[in-house]
Image: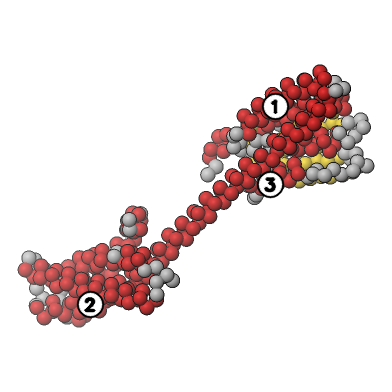
Amino acid sequence: MHPIFASRVRGAIYLAVWLSFAPLLAWLLVLMNPRPYSYAIAFAGPLTVEYAAVCLWAWWICRANPLGVAHPVRTLTTLLGAALQSAAVWVAAGALWGAVLSRVFNMDPGKAVRLMDLVPLGVLGVPLFLMSVIAHYMIIAFEEARAAERQVFVSQVSAREAELRALRAQINPHFLFNSLNSISSLAAPDPEAARRMCQLLGDFLRQSLSLGGRERVTLKEELTLADRYLAIEQVRFGARLGVVKHSDPSSLTCLVPPLLLQPLVENAVKHGVADRVDGGTIRIETRRRGEDLVVEVENPRDPEAPSRRGQGLGLENVRQRLGALDPNRTRVDVDNTPDRFRVTLTLPALDEMEARRVP
């Protein structure tokens, strides 16, 4: 399909440009051979529309002879030949239309004048067709640029989705490994606690699989999943693990990536509470601040505890997932002091209705 016909606006602009040329051609004919301007318009108007249709042929010629692919001399020869043929067609159409005006509409300026009127058609036909060729090459370049942009966008979206799937896949095995280690450590000294942890772990995995298959979940669902994880760990740590939560009700309906808080809560337990003899309290706070959702996870630290290998894996996963979600509107801030570690997540505050309106 010709690109001019792909849009009514394009077609209207193309026709308007050619129609604006008709009065100029009529004026040129009057200067060459004086005659009524009405006859000149009657002669030039339909011929201008006819040649506008002929020049559309340039699209297929340009497609068959892409710049930079065929030999330049061959391309130039082909284009000049097409221009000469198009001009010849315009001259033949002019001769025929002049005869129709003379015999059918009784508008005859004389045979000699009609023959002279064919001269500007032959002279102007070649450069006009070549101008059409240039315009069509520009259209082809524009269409190729748009196609390349679409391809880049599709590739970026596919890469981002693949990255999110990979990051999500890293989180679940990491947590499962730690949970099984906890159950193993309780199997001998406290079989009942190990059995209870198995039940809680089964419930957690069912819910995490359900949420993990979705693109977004509500913050309330994400916090519920974090509660199930903390319930598992409280079996192991008992009174050493305390949890304090404060959630702004307006924040609970906001959508977040699934399993976003899991690595942060897991780090808070593993690298905060577990390293302290008397344990500690994990604080989770969520609030909506204007167009942003803010989530904070804070845990105490033992300043004398040695750093553990892989301590930043979970935090880096969260940072990469938010960056893939929207690098311009998401942020991960870390406040690390000798006795406290706090992670603050900032991301767009969108509920289900608002998310549907986002393009």
Q: What element does badge 1 sit on? A: helix
**Crowd around label 2: few <14 · some 14–19 · many ≥20 (10 Å):** some
Amino acid on which disc 1 is placed? Phe
Q: Is residue 8 above or below residue 126?
A: above
* Residue bearing the label numbered 1: 204
**Crowd around label 1: few <14 · some 14–19 · many ≥20 (10 Å):** many
Asked whether the beta carbons under mark 3 and mark 2 sit within 8 Å of each other, the answer is: no
- Residue 150 position, x and y percent, is 49, 54
Give the quarter of the figure containing the N terminus: bottom left
* Residue bearing the label numbered 2: 122
* Residue 4 image label: none
Q: Nearer the viewer, residue 113 or 329?
A: 329
Amino acid on which disc 3 is placed? Gln
Amino acid on which disc 2 is placed? Gly
Give whichever of discs 3 and 2 has the lower sequence position.
2
* Residue bearing the label numbered 3: 320
Give whichever of discs 2 and 1 has the lower sequence position.
2
Q: Is residue 99 above or below residue 4?
A: below
Between the C-alphas of marks 2 and 1, the distance is 83 Å
Q: What element does badge 2 sit on? A: helix
Residue under the image location 85 percent in, 21 percent down: 190
Residue under the image location 64 percent in, 43 percent down: 166
- Residue 224 position, x and y percent, is 70, 27
